[in-house]
Amino acid sequence: MPRFGLLRVEGPPSRSPELYRALWRGHSLEQELTYEVLEVAPRSDWGPWLEQAHGGGWSGFNATIPHKIDLWRCIPDRSPEAEAIGATNCIVRTSQGWACHNTDSDGFWLSWEAEWRGYRPKNNCAWLLGNGGAARAIAHALRSRGFEVVVFARTPRTDFLGLEQHAFEASARAPKPDVVVNATSMGHGSQVALAPPIVWPAMQGAWAIDAVYGPDPTPFQIQAAQAGAAVLDGMPMLRMQAKKAWEYWARMLGITDF
């Protein structure tokens, strides 16, 4: 029985199970496919856990904050995109163990592009807030399409795709962006009342995209709208990421009618 799950830490309810149920509706294996949320503590060595999961018959996993980078480090069988990004949000069972992929990059870009309706970026400049696993994927998506990516974060990482990382207050002197992307955890879970402390420019004709999703606008989304931006929350990205993950799992597992 194909068995999938989400690896995360404890937090608010996840929308992933319902997204996969919707994707699988009407599929020939619909009654056999399962998806569970697994709350797993962070760890630097995922080897023993993954070995146990393989023996337990799991078929694949999604991963979210804060597991994306540590999982990637523990799985040497990587797709070219996962290798380039340095993080994984999607792993699949193989005969030898596990292979990892990254669907955050396409999930971000395709969900944003689907909303353009004639829009075209003017400056090819993006502000990226955060430097975790999701931020790495979003930076890859933007840079591979010709964007200059200006990164703001609380604490710089030693290697973030070779990009310099600035304190949030440096946004006051940054070039005007076509899009500001919140890839931090601010606005989510225990940080629900927080927003990255950037200095907003006038955002008329520009976009703000929040990787966070929920029933109510986050502080980041409210500030972006007040600055004049067109605002997109994290649900379209999550839906597209799930669709791309299912395509990847199905191909790797030999399921043809996906």
Image: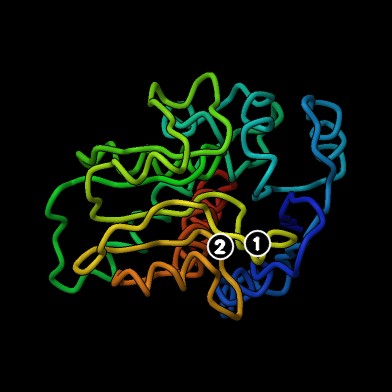
- The residue located at (47%, 36%) in the rendering is 167
Question: In this image, 136 relative to 195: left or right?
Answer: left
- The residue located at (55%, 70%) in the rendering is 218
Location of residue 73 by image quarter: top right
Kindly check if marks 2 and 1 are in contact, taking CB atoms under 8 A apart as contact. Answer: yes
Question: In this image, 133 relative to 93: left or right?
Answer: left
Question: In this image, 59 relative to 126: left or right?
Answer: right
Near mark 1 (Cα within 10 A), the count class, few <14, some 14-19 or many ≥20, is some
Q: Quadrant of the N terminus?
A: bottom right
At label 1, the amino acid type is His
- The residue located at (75%, 60%) in the rendering is 190
Query: Which x, y percent locates residue 87?
Result: 55, 34
Q: Residue 240 versus residue 153: which sits nearer the camera?
A: 153
Query: Which x, y percent locates residue 54?
Result: 80, 38
Question: To which residue does mark 2 refer?
Answer: 212
Kind of element beneath mark 2:
loop
Q: Residue 83 versus residue 251: which sits nearer the camera?
A: 83
Instruction: Name above or below for residue 38 compared with residue 128.
Output: below
* Label 2 or label 1, whichever comes before in sequence order: 1
Instruction: Name above or below for residue 39 compared with residue 97.
Output: below
Location of residue 194 by image quarter: bottom right
Instruction: Name above or below for residue 252 compared with residue 233.
Output: above
Kind of element beneath mark 1:
loop
At label 2, the amino acid type is Val
Question: To which residue does mark 1 refer?
Answer: 188
Q: How is the image coloured?
A: rainbow
- The residue located at (60%, 33%) in the rendering is 99
